[in-house]
Amino acid sequence: MPKVKKLTEILANKIAAGEVVERPASAIKELCENSIDAKSSRIIVEIENGGKNLIRVSDDGIGMSVEDAKLAVERYATSKIYNEEDLFCIKTLGFRGEALPSIASVSKFTLITREKDKPFGFKISIEGGVIKDACEIGAPIGTTIEAKDLFFNIPARQKFLKTTDTETGHITDTITSFALGYYDKSFLLIHNKKEAKNFPSATTQIERVKDILKIANSEDLYQIKADAPDAFVTGWTASPDYYKTGSKGIYIFVNGRFIKDRKINYAIFQGYKGRLMKGNFPIAVIFIKVPFQQVDVNVHPAKQEVKFLREKQVMSAISEAVNSALKAGEKILISKYQNINTDQAPTIAPSFEKKTEQKYQNARRPFVYSANDYAAEDIDYVNRQNELSEPPAYYGKTAQKNIMPDTEKHPDIKVIGQFLKTYIICEKDNEIILIDQHAAHERILFEKLKNKEKTSATASQRLLIPEVLETGFAEAEAIKSLMPDMLKIGLEIEPFGKNTFAVKAIPAFLSEKQTAPIILDVAEQLIEKGGGKQIENVLDSTLILIACHGAIRANKELSETEMKAIIFELFKCEIPLKCPHGRPTLIKMTQKEIEKLFKRIN
Ligand code: ADP
Ligand code: MG
């Protein structure tokens, strides 16, 4: 007798249900997907006892004819794809034709549906995969699907269901993600006959996004819009001042499908680079549109993951899009502290060079200060002065750009003073602003190092007597691997016998006595993180370390000019509002907030 036998359809459906229907929330996900595919504008989800006793999803979509409804509950019956070609060009949320038969095989299932132009609806009842009843019935236009007593016929699976609260939590998350993806549809969740979630249809996406991300102020949401060749990326990123300690605040939609994807999470992270503290996760909603042929959605049993044909391009499009959105948002934030917007700053042209120079001098004057105290800026200043008086032979466009970019833009903030020798207090219009002098200077130095690293033109100071450094074996190996990159930022290290190095030159803003501790710190970090693959990241953290060592400390008295210089340089930075570790450089309080605290207003 042969051992191999074909499964009955009911058993096959139950097995499929194991993949598709893990818990009430997954059944609800499938049913909502069907409602959306059916062009519904209103979707109501009713549940009892966390969906364990009852799930009912009603929509006002296109409904089904009697024939279609009968077929729809059979395995592999779908109206969404007809051939192999369609499978690789999926435009709908569903496509496998598995959800309805799967759910019907593990519950007491009823489908009621009516098409728009039909006088009657149709009802079909199924229990554990066996059809019990099918008849015409009066019904509203659209479809209602009910699944009672989920897994009543598979006690082994029923045991795995969690508490009502947990299951309800999963369902709420599911509805919330649909609501984010489809702001123009209304979603209502009713639990034990009480309203649990209500998303009335919104006219703009940001309304929905604000509601769900719990961000009251639209200014704290930056709009993403990027049209890269391989992906059209839109959505919203929250200001990095909002964050979570896990990835739950990240919502990703690919061609309208809500998915989870660690690689995309990472791409979003990259976009936020330098703005979030370690361990913090961004809050963002990202809609990625890719040509249907360039994404495989048939790679996960619950359709929660996808595969991109041009993955690398899509990922960098996402990072870029997020980064630009944040930058644009930050620019708006700081533009009110600057009297002239850089965008309007003319590029240098001979006809007005004189005028510009005049302004340049004016702008610079307050930022001249005593040496030593503020070495980096001084050197920068001196460099610029030299460049001004003695243009290099190859006086090209880029050289010009470096010389006078800031003439048209300088901070328009009144410096009030210093608090605890650590924070610079300023005022602007109706705001009081506190700047963390160390964090701000760290950001300034970091960006200088990073940019100079790219142009390999770092101001370096030669040490009169090279600093000789003895290290352990592992440190020595690490230092050797970093040497070429360090040279680019003006840190010249040479091997000097076994596990010994001579430091011959250091970035100009560092003081000689800092040399040894920095190099050892850098080496230690290299050992910890390991070089190799993530060299870009290791390099970045090395620059952060050097910036941190070089930056003015807290508890250091600053003159007004020095304070102004910091503000001036800070606002020129690419990411001015965060130090390279992701801490804020600046906090503020508005007149309104202060008046509230003094109970002048409510
Ligand atoms: P799939 O969504 O993969 O096609 P399903 O088992 O989820 O498979 O649904 C089978 C078919 O039933 C669908 O292709 C669709 O034609 C029809 N259907 C299911 N739900 C609805 C609904 N809410 N409104 C209209 N038609 C529906
Ligand atoms: Mg479906």
Image (cartoon, rainbow, N blue to C red):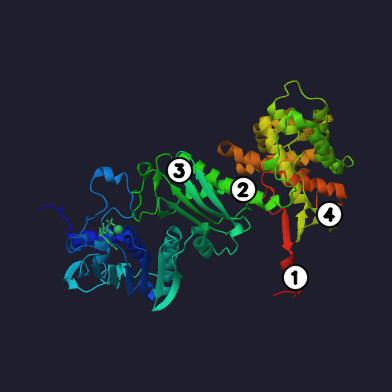
Please tell me which residue is depicted at 29% across the width and 53% down the height of the picture. 95
* Quarter assignment of residue 84: top left
Q: Nearer the viewer, residue 549 or 392?
A: 392
Closer to viewer: mark 1 or mark 3: 1
Q: Please report contact status of discs 1 and 2: CB closer than 8 Å, yes or no.
A: no
What element does badge 2 sit on?
helix
Closer to viewer: mark 4 or mark 3: 3
Q: Please report contact status of discs 4 and 2: CB closer than 8 Å, yes or no.
A: no
Res. 231 mark: 3
| Left or right: 194, with 533 as reference point | left
CA gap between label 4 and label 3 equals 49 Å
Give whichever of discs 1 and 2 has the lower sequence position: 2
Give whichever of discs 3 and 2 has the lower sequence position: 3
| Residue type, numbered disc 2 | Ala
Please tell me which residue is depicted at 49% across the width and 50% down the height of the picture. 234
Q: Residues within 10 Å of mark 4 (few under 14, many from 20)?
A: some
Res. 351 mark: none
Give whichever of discs 1 and 4 has the lower sequence position: 4
| Left or right: 462, with 530 as reference point | right
- In the image, is the residue at mark 4 within 8 Å of ligand 2 by its beta carbon? no
Q: Please report contact status of discs 1 and 3: CB closer than 8 Å, yes or no.
A: no
Give whichever of discs 1 and 3 has the lower sequence position: 3
CA gap between label 1 and label 4 equals 30 Å
Residue most toward the right? 370
Q: Is residue 5 above or below residue 600?
A: above
Please tell me which residue is depicted at 60% across the width and 47% down the height of the picture. 273
What element does badge 3 sit on?
loop
Residue at image mark 4: 555
Residue 303 in sight in this render: yes
CA gap between label 4 and label 2 equals 33 Å
